[in-house]
Amino acid sequence: MLAGYFGELIKERALHHERINIALSGGSTPKAIFDELAEKYASVIRWERVFLFWGDERCVPPDDAQSNYNMTKEHLLSKVPIPKENVFRVKGEKEPSVACMDYEEVLKKQLTWTEGVPQFDMVLLGMGDDGHTASIFPHEIGLWNAQANCVVATHPQSGQKRISLSGKVINHSKEVFFLVTGAGKAEKLDEIIHQKEACTSYPAALVVNPVWLLDKEAAAKLT
Ligand code: 6PG
C-alpha cells in the first residue's frame, strides 16, 4: 500500500513535470517499497523524467553491502528503465570531506535553487529508533542547522562516517515523506508526532510538515 501511494505520486509528478528531483532514504525499510515500486511501476512511471539522489550515504564503496546506493540499485535501479545519467550517488568511496564537497557540487549543478538553497521536489526519509533521520543523529543534532547543504556525520555506535543532507535542504524541499515501519519505531513516533517533551532532541522531530507513511505496527501508539 505504501509503495502504491508513493508510486502514484511519482507517476503523477512525472506526468506533469519534465523533471522531478527525488532524494531517497537508505537503511532497510525502503527495500520492500522499492521492490514493489519496481514490480508495479517499472512500465508506468516516465522514469526518464525522474532524477534520483540520496538524503544520506555511508562512506563506503558503491558495491558495499552497507551502501544506500547499492541497496537502491539492488531493489529499484536494476529493475526500472531509469537512465544512468539520472542517478546521482554520493561518492562514499572518497575521503568524507571530499565526498561531501563533491555532493555539494552535484546539488549546485543539478537542482533548482530558491532563496539560496537547493530544492528537491520530493525527499523520502527514514527514522531510526533513536529518532535520527538521514544521517543526522541525536548526538550530533547541531549538524541539522549546519550552514552547509550537506555535512559529514558520524554513526554513534560504529563511528562510521556518513554524508547527509542538512536540515536546511530537507526542510526546503517541496514535499517530505517519512517512511517508517515496524513496532520498534512506535515509541519514538508517539513522542515526535504528539510533540512530547523528549522529542526536541530527535532530528526527525525537526522536519517541518512531513507526510508520515506508516505501517500499523509503527503507528500502534498513535491511535
Ligand atoms: C541510513 C538511513 C537512515 C535510515 C534509518 C532507518 O543511511 O541508514 O538513511 O536514516 O532511514 O536509520 O533505518 P531502517 O530503515 O533500517 O530502520
Image (cartoon, rainbow, N blue to C red):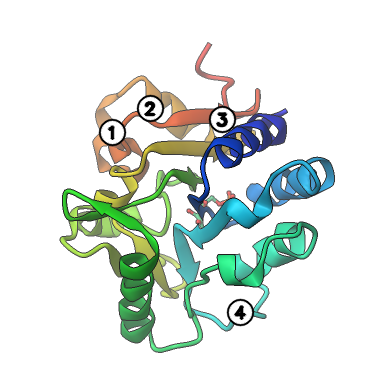
Q: Say if mark 2 contacts mark 1, CB within 8 Å.
A: yes
The answer to which image quadrant residue 2 occupies is top right
The mark found on residue 198 in the picture is 1
Residue 208's place in the image compared with 54, above or below, is: above
- Residue indicated by mark 4: 62
**How far is disc 3 from disc 1 in space, using C-alphas?**
22 Å
| Residue plotted at (59% across, 52% down) | 49
Residue 67 appearing in the image: no
- Residue indicated by mark 2: 191
N-term-proximal mark, 1 vs 4: 4
N-term-proximal mark, 3 vs 2: 2
N-term-proximal mark, 4 vs 2: 4
Between 10 and 48, the one lying in front of the other is 48
The mark found on residue 23 in the picture is none
> How many residues crowd around disc 3 within 10 Å: few (fewer than 14), some, or many (20 or more)?
many
Q: Which amino acid type corresponds to the residue marked 4 in the rendered image?
A: Pro
- In the rendered structure, the answer to whether residue 113 lies left or right of residue 43 reads left
Secondary element at image label 4: loop
Secondary element at image label 2: helix
> How many residues crowd around disc 1 within 10 Å: few (fewer than 14), some, or many (20 or more)?
few
N-term-proximal mark, 2 vs 1: 2
Q: Say if mark 3 contacts mark 1, CB within 8 Å.
A: no
Give the mark toward the camera: 3 or 2: 3
| Residue plotted at (48% across, 80% down) | 91
- Residue indicated by mark 3: 213
| Residue plotted at (58% across, 38% down) | 184
